[in-house]
Amino acid sequence: MKNYGFAVVAILVIALAPATWLTRDSRAADEAAIRESVKQMELGWNTADGSLFAKPFAEDADYVVINGNHLKGRDVIGAAHQRIFDTIYKDTMITLTVKQIRFLRPDVAVAHVSGHREGPTRDLVSDAFITLVLTKEKSGWTIAAFQNTQVVTQR
């Protein structure tokens, strides 16, 4: 009987291993795609291109700005960013670093991102902590919701 139990366990391990590998490979590909969405935003900002910045957002995305304003939709997000790239944040650069990706379901993820903005003057330098909710669509991962929170350091 002991040999039979061992054989069943061995068969289960062999049968389930490819599924585990597939899941691990899928998860790695999903994480890479999410990181690419963050890089897309960074590239859009650093090239002062609102449409490029907004490209990874869902058509009906919700975007909460660092000052608490709420933007709705990819086109509005792109246009609003183009305005700030042309005015108050002209000649600024950002660095976005993914800190964590958590899958709530295979097609829904939360990503936490730290952001740092540099500018030609001291008042344009700031840090933020960003929460993204992403969904996996037929076209790939898109940002459904974006919450931007300023990090205030004690001086």
Image (tube, rainbow, N blue to C red):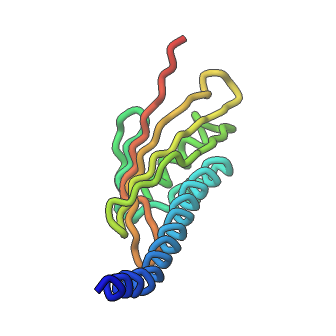
Front residue of 145 and 106: 106
Residue 133 percent location from the top left of the image: 38, 55
Q: Residue at x 36, y 69 (%)?
A: 107
| The quarter of the displayed image where residue 97 is located | top right
Front residue of 69 and 36: 36
Residue 2 percent location from the top left of the image: 32, 82
Residue 73 makes an appearance in the image: no
- Say left or right for 121 vs 20: right
Q: Residue at x 41, y 46 (%)?
A: 131
Total tally of numbered discs in the picture: 0
Q: Residue at x 38, y 87 (%)?
A: 7
Work out whether 145 lies above or below 130.
below
Quarter of the rendering occupied by the N terminus: bottom left
Q: Residue at x 42, y 80 (%)?
A: 13
Residue 84 percent location from the top left of the image: 55, 41
Quarter of the rendering occupied by the C terminus: top right
| The quarter of the displayed image where residue 65 is located | top left
Residue 121 percent location from the top left of the image: 68, 24
